[in-house]
Image (cartoon, rainbow, N blue to C red):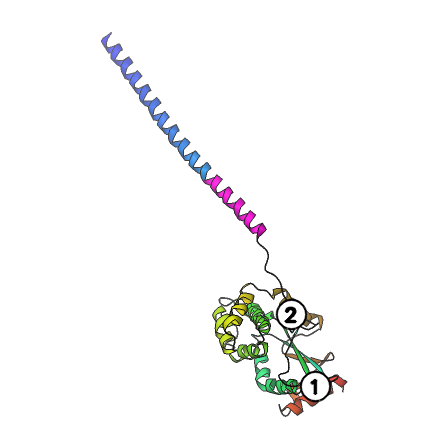
Amino acid sequence: MANNSNLSKRVALRQQQELEARRKRNARMLGVGLGVLALVVVVVIAVVIANAIGSKAPAAEQLTPPNATEGHGIAIKSKNTQPAGDVPNVVVYEDYQCPACKAYEARYGNAFQQLIDEGKITLEIRTAYFLNDANKTMNKKSSERAALAAAAADAVGKYREYHKVVYDNQPEHEGDGYTDQQLRVDFAAKAGIAGDDLATFQKLYDTKAYADFAKKSFETMGEAGIGGTPAYVVNGKKINLESLSSNDPQTVLTAIQSAASGS
């Protein structure tokens, strides 16, 4: 009888221990489950709040540069004489990362600027950014960002200066592109953008205020059947600059007038 009694006690003790272990295990599982549930609730709440804030946040206002043309270019204004009468309007298609564009700007830029200032031509620049994909590892979308920065420079009256600075500082190696530091700070300083104008310029650049305009400007290149940059066009005819014997203003003007007349 004593042995049976001891056996019964051991069985009862084992059962009690198993029950206690099961209770603790269930308690731990419940705690983990409640913790996970709490985390899920927090995440859901955060997403709901973020969506609510995002839905109320206004999209960046899209603007048009002050010297924009009907063809979505930006006109370079004369510093001296306004054009008198019907003078040729030159349309330039370019990409700020295009080495050939830089070369043409270096060779013919001064002549065009003089003709503009003498009121003998008008000129608008339509900026493409098909070389965006040239940057595989760094400074992506440099062509587009440069176009946005140039449009922002127009808003503070420094388009001509900024346009020149970008080309003067084009990287030697095609595809290296431009950094934000260069576009929004360094180039702005070199173009003479300072003080309140600098704050305005940087805000317009940072908010991509001219993204829609730049996109439409790029699209005009395809619509006009232009296959590459740079392209200088007047009355729908390409100006044959590469065949000129000189880059002096009168020689350039003669080529412009020849293209304008279709001869």
x and y percent of residue 54 in the render? 56, 51
- Most extreme residue toward the left, as rendered? 2
Residue drawn at x 41%, y 31% is 30
Residue at figure coordinates x 52%, y 46% from the top left: 49
Q: Where is residue 100 in the image (x, y as percent from the top left)?
A: 58, 80
| Segment colored magenta | 39-57
How many labels sit on residues? 2
Task: For marks 1 and 2, give the CA distance.
Answer: 23 Å
Label placed on residue 256: 1
**Extreme residue toward the top, this view:** 1
Tell me where residue 1 sits by quadrant: top left
Looking at the rendered structure, the kind of residue marked 2 is Phe
What amino acid is at disc 1? Ile
Q: Is residue 177 visible?
A: no
Residue 163 visible to the viewer: yes
Q: Residues within 10 Å of mark 1 (few under 14, many from 20)?
A: many
- Say whether residue 48 is magenta: yes
Residue 241: assigned label: none
Question: Is residue 126 one of those drawn in magenta?
Answer: no
* Image position of 148 with respect to 121: above or below: above
- Magenta segment, prevailing SS (helix, strand or loop): helix
The residue most toward the front is 196
What element does badge 1 sit on?
helix
- Quarter of the picture holding the C terminus: bottom right
Q: Mark 2 points at which residue?
A: 218
